[in-house]
Image: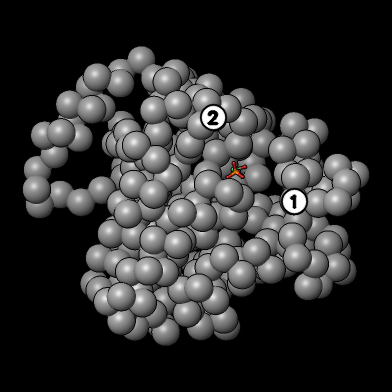
């Protein structure tokens, strides 16, 4: 079962995530981080940037792999995930840009981009800690409902729900690309530690389905139940659909001191 941690707000979640990543980098200076985009992980990136600056942690060897990218946005488009990862992660954390990969959404090479990305992940030795958000549709990465639980990095068609949710980042809803390239669920499950974050009432149903629902391709988030080390960090609103809330709180309150998330 995933460990479920209920926190007051995104800042409290960010402190936990930063703690786990700092410990990882101290243990493994060339750690491989799995990077999510969207609004959800931003407080965690801010917390991590502060820790790195305050404690003068050397992150020059840290490597990163983004979960996904839109297909067909022009190079340098501010909402391409390459741009978002550069702006929100690489620059504030001081990572080495060449060590941070994002799937290649260029239509010219899209047919081989998935296999290329999988090869890079394997060559890097896999992801040590994967940050995940979850969409209202239940997607992780851009694996929309129906995605094979064994899927690898490939092109997917976004649902209209997801395009509407992401329209806030674009001038018009029609500007949101129709296709993306995303790590598959099988790819995500290879990471050594999954940290899934969700905040707000709009995510409550997807969180409940992911943590407590049946494992099903119809609820891609439920794949976390197949992973031996998943931490789900949610606020009260996102946790509100969970049946076993009391137990999760009890387990967290009695967590052995020596155990991290
Ligand atoms: P959000 O998106 O963080 O912007 O809510 C999460 C997701 O779609 O995975």
Q: Can you give x and y, in whole percent of width and height, for residue 43 in the image?
A: 46, 54
Q: Circle 1 is placed at which residue position?
A: 169
Q: Does residue 197 lie above or below 14 as drawn?
A: above
Q: Does residue 24 lie above or below 226 as drawn?
A: below
As drawn, the label of residue 148 is none
Instruction: Give the farthest residue toward the top.
Output: 243
Mark 1 or 2, closer to the camera? 1
Q: Can you give x and y, in whole percent of width and height, for residue 179 in the image?
A: 80, 49
**Is residue 64 or residue 21 the one in the foreground?**
21
> Measuring 52% from the left and 60% from the top, which residue is drawn there?
35
Check if mark 1's residue and mark 2's residue have beta carbons within 8 Å: no
Q: On the image, which quarter does residue 153 sit in?
A: bottom right
Viewer can see residue 91: yes
Position of the N terminus, as image quadrant, is top left
Q: Circle 2 is placed at which residue position?
A: 203
> Measuring 39% from the left and 61% from the top, which residue is drawn there?
47
Mark 1 element type = helix
Q: Residues within 10 Å of mark 1 (few under 14, many from 20)?
A: few
> Measuring 51% from the left and 83% from the top, which residue is drawn there?
96
**Is residue 79 or residue 72 the one in the foreground?**
79
Image region (quadrant) for ligand 1: top right
Query: Is ligand 1 within 8 Å of the beta carbon of the residue shown at mark 1?
Result: no
Measure the alpha-carbon separation of dots 1 and 2: 19 Å
Q: On the image, which quarter does residue 4 sit in?
A: top left
> Measuring 88% from the left and 46% from the top, which residue is drawn there?
172
Query: Is ligand 1 within 8 Å of the beta carbon of the residue shown at mark 2?
Result: yes
Left-right relation of 96 to 177: left
Q: Residues within 10 Å of mark 2 (few under 14, many from 20)?
A: many
Q: Can you give x and y, in whole percent of width and height, for residue 228 in the image?
A: 31, 42
Mark 2 element type = helix
Q: Mark 1 or mark 2: name the one nearer the start of the chain.
A: 1
């Amino acid at each position: 079962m995933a460990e479920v941690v209920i926190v007051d707000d995104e800042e409290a979640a960010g402190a936990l995530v930063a703690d786990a990543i700092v410990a990882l980098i101290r243990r493994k200076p060339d750690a491989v981080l799995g990077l999510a985009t969207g609004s959800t992980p931003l407080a965690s990136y801010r917390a991590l940037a502060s820790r790195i600056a305050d404690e003068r942690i050397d992150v020059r060897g840290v490597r990163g792999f983004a979960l996904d990218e839109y297909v067909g946005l022009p190079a340098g488009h501010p909402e391409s995930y390459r741009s978002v990862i550069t702006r929100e992660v690489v620059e504030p954390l001081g990572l080495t840009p060449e060590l941070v990969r994002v799937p290649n959404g260029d239509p010219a090479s899209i047919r081989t981009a998935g296999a290329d990305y999988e090869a890079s992940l394997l060559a890097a030795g896999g992801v040590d800690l994967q940050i995940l958000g979850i969409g209202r549709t239940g997607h992780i990465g851009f694996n929309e409902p129906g995605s094979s639980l064994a899927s690898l990095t490939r092109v997917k068609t976004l649902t209209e729900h997801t395009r509407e949710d992401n329209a806030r980042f674009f001038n018009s809803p029609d500007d949101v690309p129709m296709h993306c390239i995303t790590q598959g669920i099988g790819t995500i499950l290879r990471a050594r530690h999954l940290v899934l974050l969700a905040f707000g009432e709009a995510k409550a149903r997807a969180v409940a389905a992911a943590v407590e629902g049946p494992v099903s391709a119809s609820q891609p988030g439920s794949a976390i139940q197949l992973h031996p080390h998943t931490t789900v960090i949610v606020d009260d609103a996102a946790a509100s659909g969970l049946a076993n809330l009391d137990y999760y709180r009890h387990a967290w309150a009695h967590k052995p001191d020596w155990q991290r998330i």
